[in-house]
């Protein structure tokens, strides 16, 4: 790569990329919602494969979403399990109301801290509660 980059030469590529993706720092709730949807689509495409061509883009969008959440909705230090318990309480849910996690036995093990949530469970819980998947990851 050249030591000197002509920023003006990047403008056409940036405009096309920006129009196609709307990727930029997130400054409002509407843009946050769009970026969260894009992140979900990228997660679906990459399936956790860090060799996937869209992996770097998913990390970039994830960082933007995470930064916005930290600025606008900071959470106290809590684990993913703490967040799940809070959301259950907020929504008046019991363990048997969480089919996203699995059977009653699996839910009990997760709630007791004996088992961690897997990627499928995290994605489904995030979709159900309308939060970032990062909410449930320690």
Image: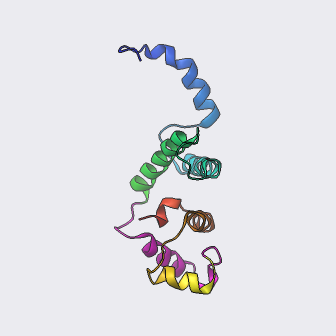
Q: Is residue 118 magenta?
A: no
Coordinates of residue 87 in the picture (x, y in percent): 52, 75
**Above or below, 126 relative to 40:** below
In the depicted view, which residue is nearer to us: 8 or 73? 8
The residue shown at (48%, 60%) is 134
Coordinates of residue 117 in the picture (x, y in percent): 52, 70
| Left or right: 111 in relation to 18 | left
The residue shown at (54%, 25%) is 14
**Above or below, 98 relative to 77:** below
Q: What span is colored magenta in the figure?
A: 74-101
| Left or right: 53 in relation to 72 | right
Q: Which quarter of the image is occupied by the C terminus?
A: bottom left
**Can residue 112 be seen in this snapshot?**
yes
Q: Which quarter of the image is occupied by the N terminus?
A: top left
In which quadrant of the rendered view does residue 93 lie?
A: bottom right
**Can residue 94 be seen in this snapshot?**
no
Coordinates of residue 45 in the picture (x, y in percent): 64, 48
Coordinates of residue 42 in the picture (x, y in percent): 61, 47
The residue shown at (34%, 67%) is 77
In the depicted view, which residue is nearer to us: 40 or 12? 40
* Total count of labels: 0
**Above or below, 83 relative to 96:** above
Q: Is residue 77 magenta?
A: yes
Q: How is the image coloured?
A: rainbow
């Amino acid at each position: 790569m050249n030591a000197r980059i002509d920023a003006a030469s990047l403008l056409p590529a940036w405009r096309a990329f920006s129009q196609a993706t709307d990727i930029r720092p997130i400054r409002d709730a509407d843009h946050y919602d769009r970026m969260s949807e894009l992140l979900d689509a990228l997660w679906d495409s990459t399936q956790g494969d860090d060799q996937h061509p869209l992996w770097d883009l998913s990390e970039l969008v994830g960082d933007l979403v995470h930064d916005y959440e930290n600025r606008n909705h900071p959470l106290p230090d809590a684990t993913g399990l703490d967040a799940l318990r809070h959301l259950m309480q907020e929504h008046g849910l019991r363990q048997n109301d969480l089919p996203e996690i699995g059977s009653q036995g699996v839910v009990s093990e997760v709630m007791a801290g004996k088992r961690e949530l897997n990627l499928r469970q995290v994605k489904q819980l995030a979709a159900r509660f309308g939060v970032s998947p990062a909410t449930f990851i320690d």
